[in-house]
Amino acid sequence: MATTKEFREIHSIYQTLLEGGLKHSFPLPQVVEEMLDPKKSANESQPVPRAAEEWLELLDMAVTPHMMRSYFNERGAQDSSLRVLIRFIVSKKSHSQDDRDKVDWLATHLFKLREEQKRRPTSWPKTDVIEILEGFDFPMLSRYAEDLLMEMPALLDEVKFFEHFSQITDSRILQRARDLKNQFGDEFFQPDVLAAVVNYNLFFGNKFHSLMQDTLRQVHEFAQTGENRPPTTAQIMDSDYRLTADALRQLSEIGRKEVVVGATSPAGNLAGQGVPPEQQLRQLGVDVEQEVLYLRNRTEELTMRLRSNLNMTSVPNSFAPLMLSEWEAAAFRTLFPESEQSFRADFARGLCRAITLIYRIYEEIPHYLEKKGSEYLWKRHYDSLVYLLYEGRNQKEILGQLAGLSEKRGLPEKSRQLQSTVQKLDTALAKVAELF
């Protein structure tokens, strides 16, 4: 049972959370007003009435785990506040999935803060967990729960050997660990189980942070390479990235024709290095297949819109209007089938791909900026921008080669058009690079 002091602290947190969401205050029961009034309830150590606890439980139902995480991440957390909330939620007579998620995060966050303060890793936390839950009477663990606990070391061993961020997503370790925790039911709050969960969370969190920082560092290094030229083979190898499969396919198609006979490109230099480019992106957690699908769908969408409206000269979006030159719009309206092998087909395909890349960049930047402050929601849009940065720089090289061929063929106007589109693509890529 919560004391008056604990009640006031919990109520203050929940009231702040809910009023922030509602954008207005809400009426309080008389018993609650009396508990919050220091003049009417001077003894802070006395237990609160059951009616007051039931009011807290009602507020607790309205507070989601995400709301609670955001609150403490934004405002900071005191050790005492986390302890009080853990004790309150564990003390509830019946528990929901949200209760387990809240205690999971609160307990882990508490020990993470202690690690940061002491500047040393947390040892096995069972003693501290027992101290936090002092006064609770837990039954012996069931045999089923004991068997589930035996699976935790296997998860830890798996995480220990992760070397790339993609292994976290490919292994489905997040969902598997969550499923395992859910199977404990109410025994989740038992000190043996909660200690094992906290231990796993801390270890996994450190590994996740390490791999994520490595990924962000590599993306930053690549984003800072020269904007007017694609990265060299050495630069790409240093940053552990490769160009995407679709870009390689385009270069190889052009290479079979007279466009790039004898020419060398960054993608061509990488072709024999032994690691497929899509694998390099997957190691960063990028869903290459999904990104390729996004581009294909946007190309089809732009083609349909431009063919249905012959007067259309710009494409609206939430970031900035995408202005189209006459030759760029015409490229979509006369897009040639993949089977056609000709300069005019390469010209149209190259322009369409460049414009589609810009369109996708302008589509993803607002989503990324909006989700940037969230815990995980930003990652999908971040991955898309990484993919688009690589595709875009490779497409600049392709268009540059086509512009050179146009000059050789005595088509200076075609060359000028290609170079103009390259400048437009370069501007969009610079906006992406600024984010990293």
Image (tube, rainbow, N blue to C red):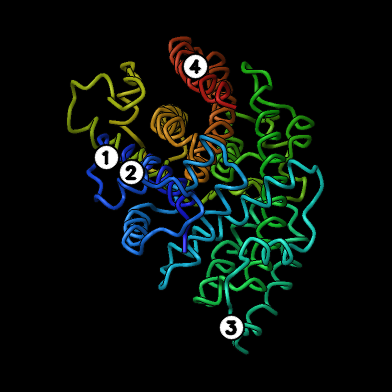
Which of the two discs, 4 and 2, sits closer to the camera? Answer: 2
Going 28% across and 53% down the picture, which residue do you hit? 31
Between marks 4 and 1, how big is the CA–CA gap?
Answer: 41 Å
Sequence-earlier tag: 4 or 3: 3
Q: Do the residues labelled 2 and 1 touch (CB within 8 Å)?
A: yes
Type of amino acid under label 1: Leu
Residue bearing the label numbered 4:
427
Quick one: label 1 or label 3, which is nearer the N terminus? 1
Category of crowding for the residue at label 3, using alpha-carbon neighbours closer than 10 angstroms: few (below 14), some (14–19), many (at least 20): few
Whether label 1 touches label 3, CB < 8 Å: no
Observer-nearest of 419 and 70: 70
N-terminal-most mark, 4 or 2:
2
Residue 414 pos. (x, y %)? 44, 15
* Of 37 and 328, the residue lying toward us: 37
Q: What amino acid type should be assigned to the residue bearing mark 4?
A: Thr
Mark 2 element type: helix
Residue 16 position by quadrant = top left
Asked if residue 43 is positioned above or below residue 160 in the image, the reply reads above
Disc 4, disc 2: CB below 8 Å? no
| Mark carried by residue 413 | none
> How far apart are labels 1 and 3 at the CA level?
40 Å
| Residue at image mark 2 | 18
Q: In which quarter of the image is residue 25?
A: top left
Q: Which residue is drawn at 76% across and 50% down?
A: 274
In whole angstroms, how far apart are the C-alphas of marks 2 and 1? 6 Å
Write down the residue under mark 1.
22
Q: Which is more N-terminal, label 3 or label 2?
A: 2
